[in-house]
Image: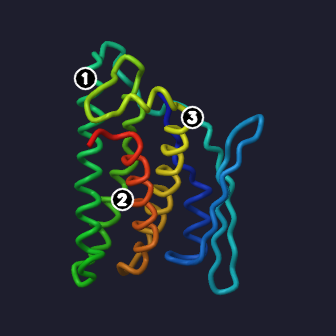
Amino acid sequence: MSTALKFATPLMVAMALVGCNKKTETTTTTTASAPATTVTASANGATATATVSTTTTSTTAVDPNMTPEDHKKARERIMKDWKKTNQTIGAMVKDPSKFDAVQVKAAAEKLNQNPWVHYPETAKGGEAKDEIWRDAAGFQQQIDKFKTAASALNAAAATATSVDGIKTQFGDLGASCKSCHDKYKQD
């Protein structure tokens, strides 16, 4: 499964147009041509809507000589980086006096890494359950959910001046991670 969503600029623009931590509605639809996510955000009478194709294409070059063990190590390294990102932002959410906009933005940008290319059929194991390969469509839905949440957090982090500007998006990201790990990660 060597796919990755290109982070969608229209989504980020839509989120930035109406501000952070505002009312948003996300709808994912699948058509014969391609799945898409529509995000509608509104605040202070302004509404912005962006429809983003969630058709996945590889954006990360993967060394064709990588062994299954290399793939496992690569995806687990990225997930550990994401864990550190969550801890960094989470500490600020717990103690808003420690909010640092530059640090939040840098941490959120780390979520643009692409571990998904490191889940080929030949690289089963590690912390990944075999369910990933038995339920590829379900796993892809989790990936798309994560990417939507990560894009929203990145957009919010770009303009956030306090924890309130990222709290909702950070919570959505955490829920996305938990949902995927509950089904596809070894205990």
In depth, the one of 162 and 133 nearer the eye is: 133
Q: Is residue 70 left or right of residue 35?
A: left
Position of the C terminus, as image quadrant, is top left
> Is label 1 or label 3 in front?
3
How far apart are labels 1 and 2 at the CA level? 25 Å
Quadrant of the rendered image containing residue 67? top left
Disc 3 crowd rating (10 Å Cα; few below 14, some 14-19, many 20+) is: few
Mark 1 sits on what residue? Answer: 70
Q: Amino acid at mark 1?
A: Asp
Asked which colour scheme the image uses, the reply is: rainbow
In depth, the one of 31 and 186 nearer the eye is: 186
Disc number for residue 108? 2
Residue drawn at the location 24% of the way across and 21% of the way down? 69
Disc 1 crowd rating (10 Å Cα; few below 14, some 14-19, many 20+) is: some
Q: Helix or strand or loop: what does disc 2 sit on?
A: helix
How far apart are labels 2 and 3 at the CA level? 26 Å
In depth, the one of 70 and 174 nearer the eye is: 174
Give how far across and how far down residue 64 sits, in percent: 36, 15
Residue drawn at the location 63% of the way across and 71% of the way down? 41
Q: Are marks 2 and 3 in contact (CB under 8 Å)?
A: no
Of the numbered discs 1 and 3, the one sitting upstream in the chain is 1
Give how far across and how far down residue 37 sits, in percent: 64, 52
Disc number for residue 137? 3
Of the numbered discs 2 and 3, the one sitting upstream in the chain is 2
Disc number for residue 133? none
Q: Helix or strand or loop: what does disc 1 sit on?
A: helix
> Is label 2 or label 3 in front?
3
